[in-house]
Amino acid sequence: MTRHHGCLKVLSPMSEPRFPGRRREGRKQDDAGASAVESPKDLSPLEKIELPTGAMVGRVFSRGWKGQRRRIVVNQEQEASYHIMSRSAGGERLFGDLEKEAFRRLMWRQARFCGVEIRTYAVMDNHFHILARVPSRAKFATRFAGEGGEARLLDHLQLLYSKQYIAVLRAELTDLRKRDMRQEADDLIDGYMRRLCDLPVFAKELKERFSRWFNTHHDRRGSLWMERFKSVLVEDGDALRTMAAYIDLNAVRAGMVQDPKDYRWCGYGEAMGGGKAARLGLCHVVGHGERGEAAWETPDVPKGMNAAEVYRCWLFADAGRPAKNTTNLVNKAGIPTETVAAEKQRKGKLSRSELLRSRVRYFSDGLVIGSKPFVEGVFAEHRSQFSPGRKSGARTLREDVNGSLFTARQLTVRALG
Protein backbone atom coordinates (compact mmCIF):
# COMPACT_ATOMS: atom_id res chain seq x y z
CA MET A 1 0.00 0.00 0.00
CA THR A 2 1.29 3.46 -0.85
CA ARG A 3 1.30 5.83 2.13
CA HIS A 4 1.05 9.61 1.77
CA HIS A 5 2.72 12.08 4.10
CA GLY A 6 2.31 15.67 2.98
CA CYS A 7 3.33 15.87 -0.65
CA LEU A 8 5.57 12.81 -0.53
CA LYS A 9 4.72 9.26 -1.53
CA VAL A 10 6.33 6.68 0.74
CA LEU A 11 7.73 3.84 -1.33
CA SER A 12 7.36 0.33 -0.05
CA PRO A 13 10.79 -1.30 0.36
CA MET A 14 9.63 -3.92 -2.11
CA SER A 15 8.09 -1.50 -4.59
CA GLU A 16 9.02 -1.89 -8.23
CA PRO A 17 7.90 -0.26 -11.47
CA ARG A 18 6.00 -2.30 -13.99
CA PHE A 19 9.10 -2.24 -16.17
CA PRO A 20 12.34 -1.53 -14.29
CA GLY A 21 14.09 1.61 -15.39
CA ARG A 22 11.48 2.48 -18.00
CA ARG A 23 10.84 6.19 -18.54
CA ARG A 24 9.03 8.29 -21.09
CA GLU A 25 11.10 9.06 -24.15
CA GLY A 26 13.09 12.23 -23.69
CA ARG A 27 12.38 12.44 -19.95
CA LYS A 28 15.22 13.79 -17.78
CA GLN A 29 16.16 12.56 -14.35
CA ASP A 30 15.99 15.17 -11.63
CA ASP A 31 18.95 13.90 -9.59
CA ALA A 32 20.11 17.20 -8.18
CA GLY A 33 21.28 18.30 -11.59
CA ALA A 34 21.95 14.88 -13.12
CA SER A 35 22.21 14.78 -16.87
CA ALA A 36 19.43 13.40 -19.04
CA VAL A 37 19.23 9.64 -19.34
CA GLU A 38 18.95 7.88 -22.65
CA SER A 39 15.55 6.70 -23.74
CA PRO A 40 15.17 2.91 -23.40
CA LYS A 41 14.48 2.89 -27.12
CA ASP A 42 18.05 4.08 -27.66
CA LEU A 43 19.57 1.27 -25.61
CA SER A 44 20.51 -2.26 -26.64
CA PRO A 45 18.66 -5.18 -25.01
CA LEU A 46 21.69 -5.95 -22.85
CA GLU A 47 21.89 -2.34 -21.70
CA LYS A 48 18.20 -2.48 -20.81
CA ILE A 49 18.68 -5.50 -18.53
CA GLU A 50 21.09 -3.37 -16.48
CA LEU A 51 18.78 -0.36 -16.13
CA PRO A 52 18.15 0.40 -12.45
CA THR A 53 14.65 0.55 -11.04
CA GLY A 54 13.13 4.01 -11.27
CA ALA A 55 11.06 5.83 -8.68
CA MET A 56 7.66 4.75 -10.00
CA VAL A 57 5.55 2.79 -7.55
CA GLY A 58 4.13 -0.68 -8.12
CA ARG A 59 3.78 -3.76 -5.94
CA VAL A 60 5.63 -6.63 -7.57
CA PHE A 61 5.90 -8.42 -4.22
CA SER A 62 2.32 -7.86 -3.08
CA ARG A 63 1.35 -11.37 -4.12
CA GLY A 64 2.53 -14.47 -2.32
CA TRP A 65 3.56 -17.82 -3.69
CA LYS A 66 0.75 -20.09 -4.84
CA GLY A 67 1.00 -23.65 -3.69
CA GLN A 68 3.76 -25.23 -1.66
CA ARG A 69 6.91 -26.99 -2.80
CA ARG A 70 8.73 -28.69 0.02
CA ARG A 71 12.22 -27.29 0.45
CA ILE A 72 14.86 -27.03 3.13
CA VAL A 73 16.16 -23.55 3.96
CA VAL A 74 18.28 -23.24 7.08
CA ASN A 75 18.04 -20.46 9.65
CA GLN A 76 19.04 -17.12 8.13
CA GLU A 77 21.67 -16.65 10.82
CA GLN A 78 23.54 -19.69 9.47
CA GLU A 79 25.59 -19.92 6.30
CA ALA A 80 24.53 -22.55 3.79
CA SER A 81 24.98 -23.57 0.15
CA TYR A 82 22.13 -24.37 -2.23
CA HIS A 83 21.62 -25.63 -5.74
CA ILE A 84 18.84 -23.53 -7.31
CA MET A 85 17.14 -24.62 -10.51
CA SER A 86 14.15 -23.41 -12.54
CA ARG A 87 12.73 -24.29 -15.97
CA SER A 88 10.86 -22.24 -18.57
CA ALA A 89 7.12 -22.72 -18.99
CA GLY A 90 6.47 -26.01 -20.73
CA GLY A 91 10.20 -26.58 -21.05
CA GLU A 92 10.16 -24.47 -24.20
CA ARG A 93 13.60 -23.50 -25.50
CA LEU A 94 13.22 -19.75 -25.23
CA PHE A 95 16.75 -18.65 -24.36
CA GLY A 96 19.24 -17.86 -27.10
CA ASP A 97 22.63 -16.24 -26.73
CA LEU A 98 21.17 -12.79 -26.02
CA GLU A 99 18.80 -14.07 -23.34
CA LYS A 100 21.51 -16.14 -21.65
CA GLU A 101 23.85 -13.17 -21.52
CA ALA A 102 21.09 -10.94 -20.13
CA PHE A 103 20.29 -13.51 -17.44
CA ARG A 104 23.98 -13.85 -16.55
CA ARG A 105 24.39 -10.11 -16.07
CA LEU A 106 21.22 -9.79 -14.00
CA MET A 107 22.16 -12.83 -11.88
CA TRP A 108 25.48 -11.30 -10.79
CA ARG A 109 23.88 -7.94 -10.01
CA GLN A 110 21.00 -9.51 -8.05
CA ALA A 111 23.48 -11.67 -6.14
CA ARG A 112 25.55 -8.65 -5.12
CA PHE A 113 22.43 -6.87 -3.93
CA CYS A 114 21.19 -9.81 -1.85
CA GLY A 115 24.65 -10.70 -0.53
CA VAL A 116 24.46 -14.13 -2.18
CA GLU A 117 27.79 -15.63 -3.28
CA ILE A 118 27.63 -17.45 -6.62
CA ARG A 119 29.87 -20.51 -6.69
CA THR A 120 28.99 -21.57 -10.24
CA TYR A 121 26.03 -21.63 -12.61
CA ALA A 122 24.75 -22.76 -16.00
CA VAL A 123 22.19 -20.98 -18.18
CA MET A 124 20.69 -23.37 -20.73
CA ASP A 125 18.11 -23.05 -23.51
CA ASN A 126 15.15 -23.66 -21.21
CA HIS A 127 16.42 -23.65 -17.62
CA PHE A 128 19.15 -22.45 -15.31
CA HIS A 129 21.22 -23.84 -12.44
CA ILE A 130 22.89 -21.74 -9.74
CA LEU A 131 25.09 -23.02 -6.93
CA ALA A 132 25.01 -20.28 -4.31
CA ARG A 133 26.31 -19.66 -0.82
CA VAL A 134 23.96 -17.65 1.40
CA PRO A 135 25.90 -16.00 4.26
CA SER A 136 24.57 -15.20 7.70
CA ARG A 137 22.30 -12.18 7.49
CA ALA A 138 23.53 -10.83 10.82
CA LYS A 139 27.15 -11.05 9.66
CA PHE A 140 26.41 -9.47 6.27
CA ALA A 141 24.34 -6.69 7.85
CA THR A 142 27.24 -5.47 9.99
CA ARG A 143 28.46 -3.42 7.00
CA PHE A 144 25.35 -1.26 7.43
CA ALA A 145 25.62 -0.91 11.21
CA GLY A 146 26.87 2.03 13.25
CA GLU A 147 27.49 5.61 12.19
CA GLY A 148 26.95 6.11 8.47
CA GLY A 149 25.29 2.69 8.12
CA GLU A 150 22.12 4.04 6.54
CA ALA A 151 24.11 6.00 3.97
CA ARG A 152 26.06 2.84 3.10
CA LEU A 153 22.77 0.94 2.72
CA LEU A 154 21.40 3.59 0.35
CA ASP A 155 24.61 3.34 -1.68
CA HIS A 156 24.16 -0.44 -1.73
CA LEU A 157 20.60 -0.06 -3.07
CA GLN A 158 22.05 1.56 -6.20
CA LEU A 159 22.93 -1.94 -7.38
CA LEU A 160 19.25 -2.23 -8.36
CA TYR A 161 17.71 1.23 -8.01
CA SER A 162 18.22 4.49 -9.87
CA LYS A 163 19.64 7.66 -8.33
CA GLN A 164 16.19 9.17 -8.64
CA TYR A 165 14.68 6.33 -6.64
CA ILE A 166 17.32 6.72 -3.91
CA ALA A 167 16.81 10.49 -3.83
CA VAL A 168 13.07 10.04 -3.30
CA LEU A 169 13.68 7.40 -0.63
CA ARG A 170 16.17 9.63 1.19
CA ALA A 171 13.67 12.52 1.13
CA GLU A 172 10.92 10.27 2.51
CA LEU A 173 13.10 9.10 5.39
CA THR A 174 13.98 12.71 6.24
CA ASP A 175 10.32 13.73 6.11
CA LEU A 176 9.20 10.85 8.35
CA ARG A 177 11.77 11.74 10.98
CA LYS A 178 10.86 15.41 10.87
CA ARG A 179 7.29 14.38 11.60
CA ASP A 180 8.53 12.32 14.56
CA MET A 181 7.55 9.10 12.75
CA ARG A 182 10.85 7.37 13.43
CA GLN A 183 9.31 3.92 13.76
CA GLU A 184 7.90 4.13 10.24
CA ALA A 185 11.29 5.27 8.95
CA ASP A 186 12.97 2.34 10.72
CA ASP A 187 10.36 -0.06 9.29
CA LEU A 188 11.06 1.28 5.81
CA ILE A 189 14.78 0.60 6.19
CA ASP A 190 14.11 -2.78 7.77
CA GLY A 191 12.08 -3.78 4.72
CA TYR A 192 15.18 -3.50 2.57
CA MET A 193 17.34 -5.26 5.15
CA ARG A 194 14.99 -8.26 5.20
CA ARG A 195 15.70 -8.84 1.51
CA LEU A 196 19.38 -9.46 2.17
CA CYS A 197 20.78 -12.99 2.54
CA ASP A 198 17.42 -14.55 1.75
CA LEU A 199 17.42 -17.42 -0.77
CA PRO A 200 13.71 -17.21 -1.77
CA VAL A 201 13.95 -13.43 -2.24
CA PHE A 202 17.07 -13.81 -4.40
CA ALA A 203 15.56 -16.51 -6.65
CA LYS A 204 12.10 -14.96 -6.88
CA GLU A 205 13.31 -11.45 -7.63
CA LEU A 206 15.86 -12.69 -10.18
CA LYS A 207 13.17 -14.62 -12.05
CA GLU A 208 10.67 -11.76 -11.93
CA ARG A 209 13.11 -9.11 -13.11
CA PHE A 210 14.29 -11.33 -15.96
CA SER A 211 10.67 -12.14 -16.89
CA ARG A 212 9.82 -8.46 -17.18
CA TRP A 213 12.84 -7.84 -19.39
CA PHE A 214 12.14 -10.94 -21.52
CA ASN A 215 8.45 -10.15 -22.03
CA THR A 216 9.21 -6.53 -22.91
CA HIS A 217 11.98 -7.50 -25.33
CA HIS A 218 9.85 -10.15 -27.06
CA ASP A 219 6.55 -8.27 -26.81
CA ARG A 220 4.89 -11.16 -24.96
CA ARG A 221 2.76 -11.63 -21.87
CA GLY A 222 2.24 -14.35 -19.33
CA SER A 223 4.38 -16.53 -17.13
CA LEU A 224 7.89 -17.28 -18.31
CA TRP A 225 8.66 -19.98 -15.72
CA MET A 226 7.10 -23.40 -15.27
CA GLU A 227 6.91 -23.31 -11.47
CA ARG A 228 8.54 -22.01 -8.33
CA PHE A 229 12.27 -22.62 -8.22
CA LYS A 230 13.68 -25.88 -6.85
CA SER A 231 16.44 -25.86 -4.26
CA VAL A 232 18.69 -28.49 -2.72
CA LEU A 233 20.71 -27.87 0.42
CA VAL A 234 24.33 -28.89 -0.30
CA GLU A 235 27.04 -29.78 2.20
CA ASP A 236 30.47 -28.19 1.76
CA GLY A 237 33.34 -30.38 0.61
CA ASP A 238 32.78 -33.44 -1.56
CA ALA A 239 29.06 -32.78 -2.14
CA LEU A 240 29.68 -29.15 -3.10
CA ARG A 241 32.41 -30.09 -5.59
CA THR A 242 30.21 -32.80 -7.09
CA MET A 243 27.27 -30.41 -7.46
CA ALA A 244 29.48 -27.70 -9.01
CA ALA A 245 30.90 -30.13 -11.56
CA TYR A 246 27.43 -31.46 -12.33
CA ILE A 247 26.23 -27.92 -13.06
CA ASP A 248 29.23 -26.96 -15.20
CA LEU A 249 28.87 -30.14 -17.26
CA ASN A 250 25.28 -29.33 -18.28
CA ALA A 251 26.25 -28.21 -21.76
CA VAL A 252 28.39 -31.35 -22.20
CA ARG A 253 25.48 -33.61 -21.25
CA ALA A 254 23.26 -31.70 -23.70
CA GLY A 255 25.76 -32.31 -26.51
CA MET A 256 26.32 -28.57 -27.03
CA VAL A 257 30.08 -28.72 -26.39
CA GLN A 258 32.65 -31.40 -25.67
CA ASP A 259 34.54 -29.34 -23.11
CA PRO A 260 32.74 -27.15 -20.53
CA LYS A 261 35.36 -24.42 -20.97
CA ASP A 262 33.84 -23.78 -24.41
CA TYR A 263 30.39 -22.95 -23.03
CA ARG A 264 30.43 -19.27 -22.10
CA TRP A 265 27.24 -19.29 -19.98
CA CYS A 266 28.47 -21.50 -17.17
CA GLY A 267 30.69 -20.67 -14.23
CA TYR A 268 33.66 -22.69 -15.51
CA GLY A 269 33.43 -21.21 -19.00
CA GLU A 270 33.27 -17.68 -17.57
CA ALA A 271 36.20 -18.40 -15.25
CA MET A 272 38.31 -19.72 -18.12
CA GLY A 273 37.42 -16.56 -20.02
CA GLY A 274 38.84 -14.40 -17.25
CA GLY A 275 35.74 -13.65 -15.15
CA LYS A 276 37.01 -12.72 -11.69
CA ALA A 277 33.75 -13.39 -9.82
CA ALA A 278 33.37 -16.79 -11.50
CA ARG A 279 36.98 -17.67 -10.67
CA LEU A 280 36.51 -16.70 -7.03
CA GLY A 281 33.39 -18.87 -6.79
CA LEU A 282 35.20 -21.95 -8.08
CA CYS A 283 38.21 -21.22 -5.89
CA HIS A 284 35.83 -21.56 -2.93
CA VAL A 285 34.45 -24.82 -4.38
CA VAL A 286 37.88 -26.47 -4.41
CA GLY A 287 38.87 -25.09 -1.01
CA HIS A 288 41.19 -22.28 -2.17
CA GLY A 289 38.79 -19.45 -1.42
CA GLU A 290 40.81 -17.99 1.43
CA ARG A 291 43.50 -17.00 -1.10
CA GLY A 292 40.96 -15.10 -3.20
CA GLU A 293 40.56 -15.00 -6.97
CA ALA A 294 44.35 -15.08 -7.43
CA ALA A 295 44.32 -18.76 -6.38
CA TRP A 296 42.79 -19.61 -9.77
CA GLU A 297 46.16 -19.22 -11.50
CA THR A 298 48.61 -19.20 -8.57
CA PRO A 299 49.73 -22.69 -7.48
CA ASP A 300 49.21 -23.78 -3.90
CA VAL A 301 52.78 -24.39 -2.72
CA PRO A 302 52.15 -27.61 -0.73
CA LYS A 303 50.19 -29.24 -3.56
CA GLY A 304 51.82 -27.56 -6.53
CA MET A 305 48.47 -27.04 -8.32
CA ASN A 306 46.34 -23.94 -8.76
CA ALA A 307 42.57 -23.92 -8.31
CA ALA A 308 41.95 -24.08 -12.06
CA GLU A 309 43.94 -27.30 -12.35
CA VAL A 310 42.31 -28.85 -9.29
CA TYR A 311 38.81 -28.11 -10.55
CA ARG A 312 39.49 -29.32 -14.08
CA CYS A 313 40.79 -32.61 -12.70
CA TRP A 314 37.56 -32.89 -10.73
CA LEU A 315 35.47 -32.16 -13.85
CA PHE A 316 37.22 -34.90 -15.77
CA ALA A 317 37.54 -37.38 -12.91
CA ASP A 318 38.50 -40.84 -14.20
CA ALA A 319 37.46 -39.80 -17.72
CA GLY A 320 40.87 -40.83 -19.00
CA ARG A 321 40.74 -44.41 -17.79
CA PRO A 322 41.23 -46.89 -20.63
CA ALA A 323 38.21 -48.96 -21.54
CA LYS A 324 38.24 -52.49 -20.14
CA ASN A 325 36.73 -53.93 -23.28
CA THR A 326 39.37 -56.36 -24.52
CA THR A 327 37.06 -58.63 -26.47
CA ASN A 328 34.99 -58.24 -29.60
CA LEU A 329 32.21 -60.41 -28.24
CA VAL A 330 28.90 -58.55 -28.01
CA ASN A 331 25.43 -59.55 -26.88
CA LYS A 332 22.22 -59.22 -28.90
CA ALA A 333 21.92 -55.55 -27.92
CA GLY A 334 25.34 -54.82 -29.39
CA ILE A 335 26.97 -54.22 -26.00
CA PRO A 336 30.36 -55.90 -25.34
CA THR A 337 29.90 -58.86 -23.02
CA GLU A 338 32.63 -57.62 -20.69
CA THR A 339 30.76 -54.32 -20.32
CA VAL A 340 27.59 -56.20 -19.43
CA ALA A 341 29.48 -58.28 -16.84
CA ALA A 342 31.02 -55.15 -15.32
CA GLU A 343 27.60 -53.50 -15.06
CA LYS A 344 26.18 -56.55 -13.32
CA GLN A 345 29.07 -56.58 -10.88
CA ARG A 346 28.62 -52.95 -9.84
CA LYS A 347 24.81 -53.31 -9.89
CA GLY A 348 24.16 -50.31 -12.08
CA LYS A 349 26.14 -47.87 -9.96
CA LEU A 350 28.04 -45.11 -11.73
CA SER A 351 31.59 -43.88 -11.34
CA ARG A 352 31.97 -40.22 -10.35
CA SER A 353 32.69 -39.26 -13.97
CA GLU A 354 29.64 -41.17 -15.25
CA LEU A 355 27.50 -39.75 -12.46
CA LEU A 356 28.40 -36.19 -13.45
CA ARG A 357 27.74 -36.87 -17.12
CA SER A 358 24.29 -38.32 -16.49
CA ARG A 359 21.19 -36.34 -15.69
CA VAL A 360 20.66 -37.28 -12.05
CA ARG A 361 17.41 -35.99 -10.53
CA TYR A 362 18.81 -36.23 -7.00
CA PHE A 363 20.87 -33.12 -7.76
CA SER A 364 17.70 -31.05 -8.28
CA ASP A 365 15.02 -33.03 -6.40
CA GLY A 366 16.89 -34.54 -3.47
CA LEU A 367 16.15 -31.74 -0.93
CA VAL A 368 19.54 -32.25 0.74
CA ILE A 369 22.84 -33.63 -0.63
CA GLY A 370 25.86 -34.49 1.51
CA SER A 371 27.40 -37.01 3.87
CA LYS A 372 25.21 -39.21 6.03
CA PRO A 373 25.83 -37.19 9.25
CA PHE A 374 25.06 -33.95 7.42
CA VAL A 375 21.74 -35.18 6.02
CA GLU A 376 20.75 -36.71 9.35
CA GLY A 377 21.52 -33.41 11.09
CA VAL A 378 19.34 -31.46 8.65
CA PHE A 379 16.58 -34.06 9.06
CA ALA A 380 16.65 -33.69 12.84
CA GLU A 381 16.55 -29.88 12.62
CA HIS A 382 13.64 -29.88 10.15
CA ARG A 383 11.84 -32.96 11.47
CA SER A 384 8.39 -31.35 11.14
CA GLN A 385 8.74 -31.14 7.35
CA PHE A 386 8.88 -34.93 6.99
CA SER A 387 6.22 -37.57 7.56
CA PRO A 388 5.63 -38.62 11.20
CA GLY A 389 6.46 -42.23 10.46
CA ARG A 390 9.89 -41.54 9.04
CA LYS A 391 12.66 -42.83 11.31
CA SER A 392 15.79 -41.42 9.67
CA GLY A 393 16.79 -38.74 7.20
CA ALA A 394 19.69 -40.02 5.08
CA ARG A 395 18.94 -42.06 1.98
CA THR A 396 21.70 -43.60 -0.12
CA LEU A 397 22.19 -42.15 -3.56
CA ARG A 398 22.10 -45.62 -5.07
CA GLU A 399 23.74 -44.65 -8.36
CA ASP A 400 26.94 -43.42 -6.65
CA VAL A 401 29.56 -46.19 -6.80
CA ASN A 402 31.65 -44.39 -4.15
CA GLY A 403 28.76 -44.52 -1.69
CA SER A 404 29.80 -41.14 -0.25
CA LEU A 405 26.70 -39.11 -1.13
CA PHE A 406 23.37 -39.25 0.67
CA THR A 407 20.09 -37.47 0.07
CA ALA A 408 17.01 -36.63 2.10
CA ARG A 409 14.63 -37.86 -0.60
CA GLN A 410 14.77 -41.34 -2.11
CA LEU A 411 13.62 -41.17 -5.73
CA THR A 412 11.92 -44.34 -6.83
CA VAL A 413 10.96 -43.29 -10.35
CA ARG A 414 13.35 -41.88 -12.97
CA ALA A 415 16.25 -41.15 -10.66
CA LEU A 416 18.33 -40.90 -13.84
CA GLY A 417 17.16 -38.83 -16.79
Image: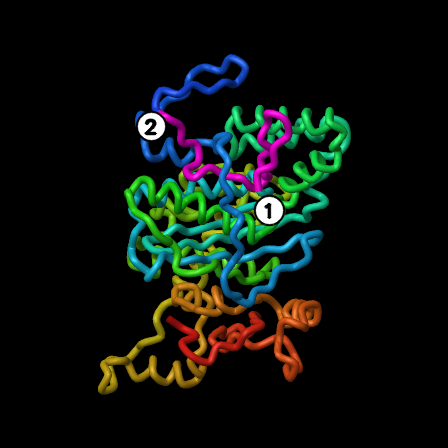
| Residue 31, percent from left and from top | 52, 18
User: Residue 9 lies in magenta, yes or no?
Assistant: yes
Image position of 205 (left or right of 128): right
Tell me where residue 81 sits by quadrant. bottom right
Left or right of 187 in this view: 399? left
Q: How crowded is mark 2: few (under 14 residues within 10 Å), some or many (20 or more)?
A: few
Q: Residue at x 52, y 32 (%)?
A: 161
Question: Residue 376: x, y in percent?
Answer: 66, 72
Q: Name the residue under label 1.
A: 288
Q: Say few, some or many: other residues with alpha carbon within 10 Å of mark 1 (under 14 / 14 to 19 / 20 or more).
A: many
**Which dot, 2 or 1, sits closer to the camera?**
2
Q: Which of 34 and 125 is in front in this view?
A: 34
Give how far across and how far down residue 89 sits, in percent: 35, 58
| Residue depicted at x 76% and y 29% | 180
The region drawn magenta spans 1-24
Q: What residue type is labelled 2?
A: Leu
Of residue 55 and residue 381, the one placed in the foreground of this image is 55
Question: Is residue 405 shown to the viewer in this render?
Answer: yes
Identify the secondary structure beneath mark 1.
loop
Name the foreground residue: 21 vs 268. 21
Q: Does the magenta stretch include residue 8?
A: yes
Identify the amino acid type marked 1: His
Query: Which residue is depicted at the point 68% across and 48% down?
Result: 136
Q: Tag on residue 112?
A: none
Residue 372 higher or lower than 77, as above or below: below
> Which residue is rendered at x = 59% and y = 39% of the image?
13
State the residue lying farthest toward the top.
33
**Disc assigned to residue 43:** 2
In what quadrant of the picture does the N terminus appear?
top right
